[in-house]
Image (cartoon, grey):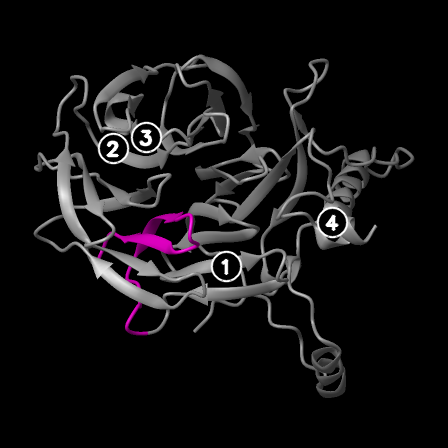
C-alpha cells in the first residue's frame, strides 16, 4: 500500500505563511504585529559573494508535480473525496535523468518517481518479480535504466526506462552489505559499494560487466591505505570515466581512474571547510566537480577534480526551510546543472538551479515557469 500523507505541499507561499505566523506569535499581545519580510530564496555562495546556485523548489509530495485531469477533478468534486497525497517516509538516495527524479525509500520499500516534465508520480519496485526489500543507493544509466542496491536482499535490481523489472545481479556470495551503485559514463560497467561490517573485510567496490551481468573484478579491502576502505558508503562516476567513493570510516573521498587504478584522496576528520565529520552522499557534474554531503555539517561541499574545496551549499537547521538540513543523505546533479539534495529528517528534496540557467530551461524546469 502506498504511504498516505495528509499535509499539503511546501511551496513559497507556504514558507511565507510560516514566517508570518511565527512573527505574529513572537510579537505577543503588547506590541503591534510586524509584517514578516518576503521569503528570499537562498543562494550560494551567500551575499555579498556572486551567487552560483539559487533555490528553485522543494519536492515533498505527488501533488508537487502531478496535474489532475479535468475528469479526475470533477470526480473528486462530485464525490467529496480528498485528493490522495503521497510522499516520502525515509528517503535515502536520489538520481535524476532528463527531469525524472528517482528517490529510494527504505521504509516504503520502493523507488519514488517524480516525473517533472511528465507531471506524474509513480512507485517502482513494489510488485513482483522486481519487488524490493530495503532499497538504498540508486543510479540511472545513459539509456535510462535504473539500478538499485537492495541491502536486505543482497542484490542489485535493474529496471528499464518505464520502471519495468529487467534482472537481478549479485547474491549473498558476492555481497555483505551493498549500499550504493554507479553506472560508468559509457554504460558498460556497474560499480557497487559493499560497505561490509565490523567483522568483515569486504569493504570494497564490486564491478559488474553490464553486458553479461557478471562480476568482472573486486577493488579494495578493509584498511587505511590508498585504495583501501573502511565503511565505504556512496559512489559516483564522472564524465571522463573515473569514479569517486565516500570512504566514510576514514573520513575521506578516494578517486580512481577509468582503468580503476587509484588516483588521489582528499578530506580528513575535522570541523573546518574541506574536512568531514560524517561524509555520506556524493555526486559529480559535467565539469568534473565533486559534491559531497556531510550529514553532521548539514551541507554539501563542492570540490574540483583535484579535491580542492570550491564552496558549500546549505547549513544545519531545525526549521526545514530551503537550505536547512537536519539529516541530509544524498545529492545528485542533472544534465543541466541543477542540484538535488535529500534530507531524511524533513523528508524532502531541495532543488537548486545554477544562476546561468533560466527557470524555464532544462529537463526539470517547472512547467509553471515554462508557461510564464
Comes first in the chain, label 1 or label 4: 4
Q: Which mark is residue 163?
A: none
State if disc 1 and disc 3 touch (CB < 8 Å): no
Q: Is residue 105 left or right of residue 195?
A: right
Few, some or many residues within 10 Å of mark 2 (<14, 14–19, 20+): many
Frontmost residue, 172 versus 304: 304
Frontmost of labels 1 and 4 is: 1
Mark toward the viewer: 4 or 2: 2
The answer to whether residue 299 is left or right of residue 131 is right
Q: Secondary structure at mark 4?
A: helix
Query: Which of the two discs, 4 and 2, labels the residue nearer the N terminus?
Result: 4
Q: Which of disc 3 and disc 4 is earlier in sequence?
A: 4
Q: Is residue 5 visible?
A: no
Q: CA distance from mark 4 to mark 3?
A: 40 Å
Q: Is residue 329 magenta?
A: no
Q: Earlier in the sequence, mark 3 or mark 2?
A: 2
The residue sitting at 28% across, 72% down in the picture is: 129
Give the label on residue 14, or none. Answer: 4
Q: Residues within 10 Å of mark 3 (few under 14, many from 20)?
A: many
Mark 2–mark 1 Cα distance, whole angstroms, equals 26 Å
Provide the residue span drawn in magenta.
128-152
Percent x, y for residue 273?
46, 14
**Residue that carries the numbered disc 2 in the rendered image:** 232
Please state if 230 lies on the left or on the right of 25 as rendered: left
Q: Which residue is mark 1?
A: 113
Between 236 and 67, the residue placed more toward the observer is 236
Determine which residue is flagged by label 3: 243
Q: Secondary structure at mark 3?
A: strand
35 or 301: nearer the viewer: 301
Amino acid at each position: 500500500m502506498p504511504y498516505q500523507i495528509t499535509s499539503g505541499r511546501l511551496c513559497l507561499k507556504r514558507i511565507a505563511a510560516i514566517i508570518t505566523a511565527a512573527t505574529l506569535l513572537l510579537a505577543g499581545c503588547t506590541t503591534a504585529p510586524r509584517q514578516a519580510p518576503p521569503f528570499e530564496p537562498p543562494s550560494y555562495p551567500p551575499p555579498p559573494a556572486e551567487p552560483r546556485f539559487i533555490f528553485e523548489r522543494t519536492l515533498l509530495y505527488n501533488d508537487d508535480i502531478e496535474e489532475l485531469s479535468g475528469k479526475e477533478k470533477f470526480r473528486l468534486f462530485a464525490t467529496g473525496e480528498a485528493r490522495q497525497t503521497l510522499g516520502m517516509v525515509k528517503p535515502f538516495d536520489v538520481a535524476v535523468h532528463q527531469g525524472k527524479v528517482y528517490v529510494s525509500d527504505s521504509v516504503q520499500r520502493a523507488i519514488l518517481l517524480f516525473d517533472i516534465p511528465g507531471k506524474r508520480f509513480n512507485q517502482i519496485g513494489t510488485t513482483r518479480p522486481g519487488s524490493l526489500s530495503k532499497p538504498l543507493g540508486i543510479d540511472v544509466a545513459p539509456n535510462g535504466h535504473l539500478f538499485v542496491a537492495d541491502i536486505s536482499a543482497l542484490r542489485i535490481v535493474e529496471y528499464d526506462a518505464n520502471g519495468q523489472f529487467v534482472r537481478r545481479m549479485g547474491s549473498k556470495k558476492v555481497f555483505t552489505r551493498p549500499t550504493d551503485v554507479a553506472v560508468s559514463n559509457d554504460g558498460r560497467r556497474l560499480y557497487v559499494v559493499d560497505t561490509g561490517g565490523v567483522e568483515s573485510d569486504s569493504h570494497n567496490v564490486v564491478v559488474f560487466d553490464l553486458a553479461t551481468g557478471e562480476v568482472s573484478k573486486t577493488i579494495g579491502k578493509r584498511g587505511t591505505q590508498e585504495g583501501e576502505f573502511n565503511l565505504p558508503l556512496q559512489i559516483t562516476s564522472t564524465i571522463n570515466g573515473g569514479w569517486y567513493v565516500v570512504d566514510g570510516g576514514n573520513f575521506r573521498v578516494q578517486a580512481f581512474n577509468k582503468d580503476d587504478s587509484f588516483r588521489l584522496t582528499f578530506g580528513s576528520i575535522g570541523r573546518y571547510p574541506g574536512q568531514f565529520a560524517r561524509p555520506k552522499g556524493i555526486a559529480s557534474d559535467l565539469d568534473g566537480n565533486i559534491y559531497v554531503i556531510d550529514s553532521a555539517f548539514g551541507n554539501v561541499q563542492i570540490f574540483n577534480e583535484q579535491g580542492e574545496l570550491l564552496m558549500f551549499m546549505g547549513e544545519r537547521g531545525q526549521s526545514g526551510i530551503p537550505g536547512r538540513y537536519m539529516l541530509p543523505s544524498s545529492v545528485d546533479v542533472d544534465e543541466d546543472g541543477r542540484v538535488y539534495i535529500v534530507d531524511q529528517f524533513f523528508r524532502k528534496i531541495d532543488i537548486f538551479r545554477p544562476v546561468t540557467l533560466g527557470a524555464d530551461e532544462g529537463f526539470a524546469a517547472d512547467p509553471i515557469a515554462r508557461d510564464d
